[in-house]
Amino acid sequence: MTDEALPIETAFEGEPGQLVTLSPLVRRMTAPNPGPMTFKGTNTYVVGHGAVTVIDPGPDLPEHVAALTAALAGERVARILVTHTHRDHSPASRALAAATGAPIIGCAPHHPFRAPHPDEAERADAANDLAYVPASVLADGDAVEGDGYTLQAVATPGHTMNHLAFALPQERALFSGDHVMAWSTTVVAPPAGSMAAYMASLDKLKTRDDVVYWPGHGGAVRDPARFLRALQHHRRQRERGILACLRRGEATIPGIVAATYEGLDPRLARAAAVSVLAHLEDLCARGLATAEGGPGVTARYAAAEPQQPA
């Protein structure tokens, strides 16, 4: 396997409700919300011992919050961190805060990359936790100190524009949320997400020296530098495939999806369509594609005519 091949890893340890030790400072409990977009479920991480930090309490599932608080009996939740405000990551923060008294901090409230088009508004609202209101927001580089550990915010917009990862320098680890995951590529879905921002965030992570990522779904990314290169290669290949479709005269997103996603699970058709839209928005912004009336789900697209030298 070359550096350019995407090394997908689906191995996973732990059942919902089970608090699994991953490293001296990190434990994980997975919420019981498996599915085609969430894999085994949303990963909730516990950092430290005694006075702990909980990262991404997960969806609004009382049984998950009850299992987490039971597993942490005898310890104190000092703070709750949230990577982003999709409904499978942040809603349980409120129930956990009510049960423990811990403050909710981390990402900013939801803010989209752009205003939704009329045909996107319902989907956009359904995906995002609009009730999330943190006690404080962490900016890029801000840190919180625990007993024997530090968690530093790393702004990684793209999947959502408020997305944060959290670095754990004591273990050279990064809680990567939904920005980088070993089991699957990340869906970048406008209007909440931006492909240009996502790619820039991958570039940013390439400058770091983390040795392991703990993602929001699935198991660890054990060779982050290689995985980041492979992700970028995958996205460039997808972009080239979309441009090839446009040059052949394929003008619609459904047609592009059919031509570029062979053997697609029908349950993932919408995710594929919004990822293609994210690429098309980026291509239009860079002058490589055009869209009648501007980019959108129902727009008709074409490859831009190459500029002629003056």
Image (cartoon, rainbow, N blue to C red):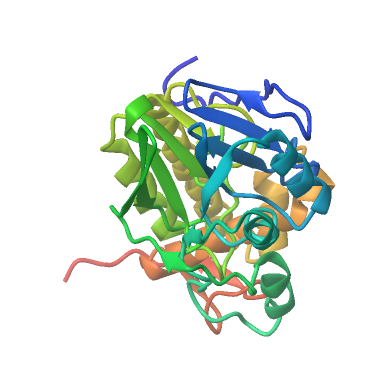
Name the residue nearer the viewer: 116 or 33: 33
237 over 88 or under it: above or below: above
Task: Give the residue at x 56% y 71%.
Answer: 191
Task: Give the residue at x 39% y 67%.
Answer: 305
Q: Quadrant of residue 76?
A: top right
The number of numbered discs placed on residues in the rendered structure image is 0
Does residue 103 appear left or right of residue 219 in this picture? left
Residue 77 rendering spot, x and y as whole percentages: 56, 46
Does residue 142 appear left or right of residue 240 in this picture? left
Residue 54 rendering spot, x and y as whole percentages: 56, 45
Quarter of the picture holding the C terminus: bottom left
Residue 52 rendering spot, x and y as whole percentages: 51, 40
Residue 11 rendering spot, x and y as whole percentages: 67, 20
Name the residue nearer the viewer: 128 or 196: 128
55 over 72 or under it: above or below: below
Task: Give the residue at x 63% y 35%.
Answer: 74
Does residue 18 appear left or right of residue 145 in this picture? right
Please say whether residue 173 is visible from this viewpoint.
yes
Q: Residue furthest front?
A: 74
Please say whether residue 178 is visible from this viewpoint.
no
Task: Give the residue at x 26% y 38%.
Answer: 207
57 over 246 or under it: above or below: above
283 over 69 or under it: above or below: below
Q: Residue furthest top?
A: 1
